[in-house]
C-alpha cells in the first residue's frame, strides 16, 4: 500500500475482523500519493539506511537503545549517521541507534519519568498512544511490559522516524498508523490504557476528543491525559488569538478544574491531576538534531514566565481517569 508503506501486519490482527475494511479505507485516504510532498524522499532515505543486525535493544532506559555502540565499520557508521540526519528534525526521543545518539528537541524521557509512577502497571496491557510522535513513549510502554502498543499520529515524518527503529528491531508488538483520533472507530473499547499526550489543546472541541477516547478504553482501563494547563482563566479556559508559543492551532488551554469537569462530563470516573510541571529550557531546546527555533525563542526575552505573545509560559498537567461505566 502507498509505495513502501506496508500496514499488512496490522490489518491481519485478529481483533480487526470486523474493522479491516474501515482501516483499509482510512489508510488509503491518509496515504494518497501527493498528500505528502517529501514522503517519497524520506522513504528512499529509510530504504538506503545500511542493513544491520541489531542483536541488542533496551526499551526501558532514557534513550531507546538499538544495537551496540562501537560494532560498526566506518562505512556503515557514516552511512547510518548521514541517513538519520537526513530525516531531521527529530523532536521526540532520545535514541541511541548503534553509534548515533539522537539528541532530540524534547527530553521525552523526563515526561515519562513524571507519568510512569502514577499509571496502572502496563504488564501484558494493550495500549493506545494517541499523537504518538516518533513512537518514543510507545517503546517505553513496551519496556514497561505492555503486550501490544498501537500508536497513531498523522505526521508522515514521525512515521518514517518510527520505521527507522522498526528496520532494526522488527518488533511485532508495536504498530504505528498515520491517522488521527477522528479516524478511529467510534466504539472499539479494546485498550487497557489509552494515552493522549500533547493533543487536547490542538482540538477545536476538546469535549469531543475526550468522548472519542472514552470509546476506545476497555471497561477496567484508564485514560492518561497530558496537556497544557493554566493556573487561572475566565470560565477556566484561555483561548489564544493567533498563536501560542509560536504554535498554530492551539484552540484552548484550560485550568485543572475545568479539565477535570470535562472528564467527568465525558463519563470518566475518578479523574485527578497527578502532576503539574512548567516546561524548562532543558526539557525543550534546540540541538544538533533539531536546529530550528525551540522553547527559548518562544518565550518573552524579557520575562520567561510569558510566551512571546504575552500568554502564561507553557505548563503541563497530567491527568488520570478510570474508564466510563458500561451503559446497560
Image (cartoon, rainbow, N blue to C red):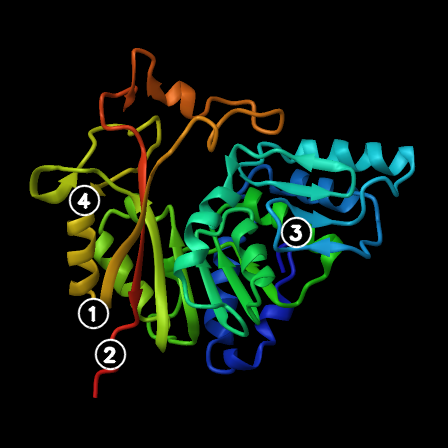
Name the residue that disc number 4 marks.
Answer: 255
Most extreme residue toward the top is 302
Which of the labelled discs sits on residue 163, or is there none?
Answer: 3
Name the residue that disc number 1 marks.
Answer: 267
Q: Position of residue 156 (x, y in %)?
A: 55, 46
- At 52% across and 68% down in the image, what residue appears? 24
Viewer-nearest of labels 4 and 3? 4
Q: Residue 169 lies in what quarter of the image?
A: bottom right
Q: Secondary structure at mark 4?
A: loop
Gap between marks 2 and 1, in whole Å?
Answer: 7 Å
Viewer-nearest of labels 1 and 3? 1
Which quarter of the image is occupied by the N terminus? bottom right
Whichever of callouts 4 and 1 sits on the residue coming sooner in the sequence is 4
- Is residue 162 at least partly visible in the picture? yes
Whichever of callouts 4 and 3 sits on the residue coming sooner in the sequence is 3
Q: Are marks 2 and 1 in contact (CB under 8 Å)?
A: yes
Which of the labelled discs sits on residue 325, or is there none?
Answer: 2
Which quarter of the image is occupied by the C terminus? bottom left
Amino acid at each position: 500500500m502507498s509505495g513502501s508503506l506496508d500496514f499488512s501486519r496490522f490489518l491481519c490482527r485478529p481483533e480487526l475482523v470486523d474493522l479491516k475494511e474501515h482501516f483499509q479505507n482510512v489508510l488509503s485516504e491518509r496515504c494518497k500519493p501527493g498528500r505528502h510532498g517529501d514522503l517519497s524522499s524520506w522513504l528512499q532515505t529509510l530504504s538506503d539506511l545500511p542493513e544491520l543486525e541489531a542483536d541488542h535493544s533496551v526499551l526501558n532506559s532514557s534513550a531507546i537503545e538499538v544495537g551496540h555502540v562501537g560494532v560498526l565499520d566506518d562505512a556503515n557508521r557514516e552511512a547510518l549517521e548521514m541517513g538519520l540526519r537526513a530525516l531531521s528534525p527529530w523532536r521526540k526521543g532520545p535514541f541511541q541507534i548503534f553509534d548515533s545518539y539522537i539528541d532530540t528537541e524534547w527530553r521525552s524521557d523526563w515526561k515519562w519519568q513524571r507519568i510512569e509512577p502514577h499509571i496502572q502497571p502496563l504488564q501484558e496491557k494493550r495500549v493506545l498512544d494517541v499523537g504518538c510522535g516518533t513512537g518514543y513513549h510507545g517503546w517505553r510502554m513496551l519496556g514497561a511490559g505492555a503486550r501490544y502498543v498501537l500508536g497513531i499520529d498523522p505526521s508522515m515524518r514521525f512515521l518514517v522516524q518510527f520505521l527507522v527503529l522498526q528496520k532494526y528491531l522488527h518488533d511485532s508488538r508495536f504498530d504505528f498508523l498515520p491517522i488521527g483520533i477522528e479516524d478511529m472507530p467510534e466504539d472499539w473499547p479494546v485498550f487497557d490504557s489509552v494515552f493522549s499526550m500533547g493533543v487536547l489543546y490542538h482540538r477545536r472541541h476538546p469535549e469531543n476528543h475526550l468522548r472519542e477516547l472514552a470509546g476506545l478504553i476497555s471497561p477496567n482501563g484508564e485514560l492518561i491525559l497530558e496537556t497544557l494547563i493554566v493556573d487561572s482563566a475566565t470560565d477556566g479556559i484561555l483561548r489564544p488569538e493567533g498563536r501560542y508559543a509560536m504554535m498554530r492551532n492551539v484552540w484552548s488551554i484550560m485550568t485543572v478544574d475545568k479539565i477535570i469537569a470535562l472528564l467527568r462530563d465525558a463519563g470518566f470516573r475518578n479523574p485527578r491531576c497527578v502532576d503539574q510541571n512548567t516546561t524548562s529550557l532543558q526539557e525543550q531546546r534546540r540541538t544538533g538534531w533539531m536546529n530550528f527555533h525551540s522553547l527559548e525563542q518562544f518565550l518573552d526575552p524579557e520575562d520567561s514566565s510569558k510566551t512571546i505573545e504575552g500568554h502564561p509560559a507553557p505548563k503541563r498537567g497530567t491527568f488520570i481517569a478510570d474508564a466510563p461505566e458500561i451503559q446497560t
